[in-house]
């Protein structure tokens, strides 16, 4: 492996113009394809295998066109204190507003609350439902402006008017200013680390180019592969993250080789052969984590994971080819300014912050280990009370009209009104055997029994399809959509199904957004352990090959699990229990987003293994070359600690930027990822890892003889390269001489 990558690096250095032109051609080709490709279809969220999804599929089959994903807006009208919305002047204002809302080219219908009996019992609150012909992301600016103007005119009459629903979604998501801030902080960290604008700019430039290639490719393939508009979100985030990391390590190793007196071409080849080997295996661990998302069984997550894995592969290829090509163009520009002025490069000091920290840990390995494990364990304790769900408008800021509409509906109609359950009754067999009358009787019996269940406030009249064999009705719980009591109610209704089915001959399923969120949370929880087993198991095998050690991969996996549990505990402590929530601008606490654990495990596992490979591979390299275990730990920290810290700070800055977003789910993702990287990089990799290696000594690098014979040898440490490099160097080639003059 190392020798092959050595040749790749040397070839890229010598044929730099060809390499640059190839990547430029690739970017141009996929960019042109992205411009000409049809737009990505938003297929919506689906989760095969759960009851809620089966019920939605049945509704699509029996009520064709009725469940189209057109945008909706629920406009809430609240009368001034002490007055009723049913008063003549307020009623006239509401009816006028509904007429204005219905007057739009994309509006399918706008239901008058007084005709639909959508008025609260106390007469203070009413709501109108506006249905559009198109999905929310297809609404024109004119339609959105018309909705906003109608709300403003109704407010002018003295009513409190708020609106929620998918039509209010502005399409904003993670990105924009958060990514710009993250890149800016990354530039500062790189500049401080390298002391050179070129050395700081090179990882950023190549990472941005890699993200450009990846995103253009995803857009090009979106239509034929059925990718949604959200597929590239994870690819962009991770492509930028690993792109900076991988280029950072290659450039750092190049500067180290130049300090040893190597010619630019030889230094580049050695950097790609050694650091590039670590890049390849680090990239493979990330790809394993992302491709492992297929285990969860959510099509959207599978596509996101595979797209992000592709972005990581592009980042690896760029680090191995384009980075050495750029080093060929500007071999001295990435060096420190004082080295360029002196005309000679000083080798890195034997004693730096990394070595001092390593010696501190080596002197006190047991206290450091105990403190690190106990600290992470304490942070992980809140994880035991983790509640998964899908926060909705109730989790938004009170400054948004969606949140105010949610609160107004909960106050006027009860907390369960914002999350009604949808019951789909399939009486097809009963109707075929006995006729429509018996089918209606079966639906009536099921509706009456469910309505009598404790925790149910009301049941709507059943709506039949044209064939008369399927009915749909809504069930309003007495508790909020995210309440544990609502989850218990759904379970109770489903548990009563066998008795009702045997008595009526008809079957039913419970769905709706509330039931869907409950089912998703249950499926994600059940998939989390298999996902961990697959991902961690494959990574352990890969690290066995990399480090040729039995204990180092196990230690890496256990350390990762500690950091993930601690970061999930921190998320629960802030976003579910509310400790310190106000400091992050979180106004409402509740369940943790269902997909959060999966996202956290997948992304952080990849980044954690990056740091593990880069840090420990230098220790392994020193140990293979004859240093004692303690000396190897110190050597690894001397060479890698600074760049690992820089890489971690960059990732923390990128993820922490999302905490400033207004959306609570984006805040949660940003906080969770930033805290996980912080804990894994600085507690696990920089403290627990050297402490464990110090306690194990030579045993850390032990491998059973039978396993040693089975495992392939990949020479990640570049032992063969080091031996070759220590022999007298050949005369510089014309390409090397030209590079030195640049």
Image: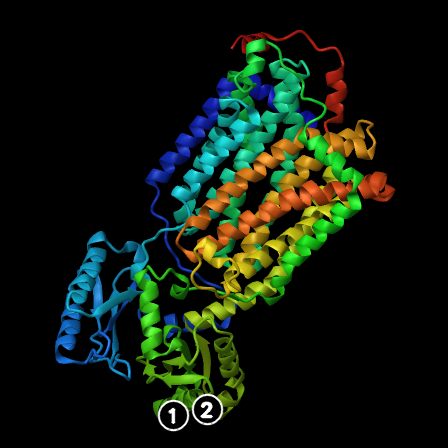
Residues at discs 2 and 1 in contact (Cβ within 8 Å) = yes
Estimate the x, y position of residue 213 in percent, counting from the top left.
Answer: 45, 35
User: Helix, strand, or loop for circle 1?
Assistant: helix
Hey, which quadrant is residue 249 in on the image? Answer: top right
**In this view of the protein, which residue sits in the foreground, 370 or 118?**
370
Display colour scheme: rainbow
Above or below: residue 521 compared with residue 690 = below
Specify whether 356 is left or right of 608: right
Specify whether 278 is left or right of 496: right
Estimate the x, y position of residue 29 in percent, counting from the top left.
Answer: 40, 32
Quarter holding the N terminus is: top right
Residue 579: in sight, yes or no?
yes
Above or below: residue 275 compared with residue 727 = below
- Of callouts 2 and 1, which one flags the residue occurring earlier in the amino acid sequence? 1
Above or below: residue 638 compared with residue 391 = above
Instruction: Single out the residue that lies furthest toward the right.
Output: 705
**In this view of the protein, which residue sits in the foreground, 414 or 3?**
414
User: Helix, strand, or loop for circle 2?
Assistant: helix
**In this view of the protein, which residue sits in the foreground, 415 or 74?**
415
Question: Which residue is at 55% across, 26% downward?
Answer: 321
- Tell me, for residue 651, which label it has, or none: none
Hey, which quadrant is residue 351 in on the image? Answer: top right
- Badge 1 crowding class, 10 Å Cα cut-off, few under 14, some 14 to 19, many 20 or more, is some
Question: Which residue is at 63% across, 25% downward?
Answer: 253
Estimate the x, y position of residue 414 in percent, counting from the top left.
Answer: 37, 78
Specify whether 245 is left or right of 66: right
What's the CA distance linking mark 2 and mark 1? 8 Å
Above or below: residue 198 compared with residue 486 = above
Residue indicated by mark 2: 504
Estimate the x, y position of residue 420 in percent, counting from the top left.
Answer: 39, 76
Residue 715: in sight, yes or no?
no
- Tell me, for residue 441, which label it has, or none: 1
């Amino acid at each position: 492996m190392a020798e092959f990558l050595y040749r790749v690096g040397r070839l890229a250095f010598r044929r730099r113009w060809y390499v640059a032109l190839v990547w430029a051609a690739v970017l141009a080709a996929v960019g042109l394809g992205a411009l000409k490709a049809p737009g990505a279809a938003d297929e919506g969220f689906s989760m095969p295998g759960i009851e809620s999804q089966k019920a939605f599929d049945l509704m699509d089959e029996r009520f064709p066109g009725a469940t189209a994903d057109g945008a909706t807006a629920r406009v809430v009208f609240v009368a001034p204190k002490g007055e009723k919305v049913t008063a003549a002047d307020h009623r006239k204002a509401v009816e006028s507003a509904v007429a204005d809302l219905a007057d739009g080219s994309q509006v399918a219908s706008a239901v008058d609350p007084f005709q639909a009996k959508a008025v609260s019992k106390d007469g203070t609150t009413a709501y109108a439902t506006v249905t559009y012909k198109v999905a929310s992301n297809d609404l024109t600016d004119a339609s959105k402006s018309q909705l906003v103007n109608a709300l403003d005119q109704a407010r002018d009459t003295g009513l409190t008017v708020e609106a929620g629903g998918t039509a209010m979604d502005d399409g904003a998501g993670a990105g924009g200013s958060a990514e710009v801030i993250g890149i800016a902080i990354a530039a500062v960290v790189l500049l401080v680390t390298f002391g050179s604008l070129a050395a700081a700019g090179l990882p950023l430039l190549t990472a941005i180019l890699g993200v450009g290639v990846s995103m253009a490719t995803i857009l090009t393939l979106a239509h034929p592969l059925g990718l949604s508009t959200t597929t590239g979100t994870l690819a962009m985030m991770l492509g930028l993250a690993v792109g900076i990391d991988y280029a950072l390590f290659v450039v750092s190793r190049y500067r180290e080789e130049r300090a040893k007196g190597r010619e630019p071409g030889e230094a580049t080849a050695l950097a790609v052969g050694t650091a590039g080997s670590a890049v390849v295996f680090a990239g493979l661990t990330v790809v394993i984590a992302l491709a492992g998302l297929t285990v969860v069984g959510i099509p959207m997550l599978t596509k996101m994971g595979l797209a992000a894995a592709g972005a990581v592969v592009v980042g690896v290829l760029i680090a191995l080819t384009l980075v050495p090509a750029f080093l060929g163009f500007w071999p001295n520009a990435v060096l420190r300014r004082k080295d360029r002025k002196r005309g000679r490069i000083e080798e890195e000091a034997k004693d730096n912050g990394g070595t001092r920290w390593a010696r501190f840990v080596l002197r006190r390995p047991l206290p450091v280990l105990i403190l690190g494990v106990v600290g992470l364990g304490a942070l992980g304790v809140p994880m035991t009370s983790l509640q998964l769900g899908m926060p909705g408008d109730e989790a938004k800021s009170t400054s948004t009209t969606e949140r105010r509409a949610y609160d107004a509906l909960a106050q006027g109609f009860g907390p369960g009104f914002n999350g009604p359950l949808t019951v789909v009754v399939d009486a097809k067999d009963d109707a075929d055997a006995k006729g429509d009358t018996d089918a209606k009787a079966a639906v009536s019996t099921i509706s009456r029994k469910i309505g009598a269940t404790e925790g149910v406030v009301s049941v709507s009249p059943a709506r039949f399809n044209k064939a008369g064999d399927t009915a749909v009705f809504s069930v309003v719980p007495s508790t909020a959509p995210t309440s544990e009591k609502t989850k218990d109610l759904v379970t109770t209704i489903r548990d009563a199904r066998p008795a009702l089915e045997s008595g009526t001959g008809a079957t039913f399923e419970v769905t709706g957004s509330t039931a869907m969120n409950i089912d998703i949370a249950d499926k994600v929880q059940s998939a989390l352990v298999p996902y961990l087993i697959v991902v961690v198991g494959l990574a352990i095998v890969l690290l066995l090959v990399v480090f040729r050690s039995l204990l180092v991969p196990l230690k890496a996996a256990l350390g990762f699990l500690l950091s993930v549990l601690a970061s999930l505990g921190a998320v629960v402590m802030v976003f579910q229990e509310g400790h310190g929530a106000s400091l992050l601008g979180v106004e409402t606490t509740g369940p943790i987003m269902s997909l959060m654990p999966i996202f956290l495990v997948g992304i952080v596992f990849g980044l954690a293994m990056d740091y593990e490979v880069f840090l420990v591979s230098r220790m392994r390299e020193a140990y293979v070359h004859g240093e004692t275990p303690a000396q190897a730990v110190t050597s690894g920290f001397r060479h890698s600690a600074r760049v690992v810290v820089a890489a971690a700070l960059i990732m923390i800055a990128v993820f922490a930027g999302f905490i400033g977003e207004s959306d609570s789910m984006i805040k949660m993702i940003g906080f969770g990822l930033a805290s996980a990287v912080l804990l894994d990089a600085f507690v696990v990799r920089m403290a627990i890892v050297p402490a464990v290696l110090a306690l194990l000594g030579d045993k850390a690098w032990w491998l059973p003889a039978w396993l040693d014979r089975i495992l392939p040898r990949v020479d990640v440490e570049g032992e063969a390269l080091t031996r070759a490099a220590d022999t007298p160097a050949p005369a510089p080639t014309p390409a090397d001489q030209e590079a030195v003059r640049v």
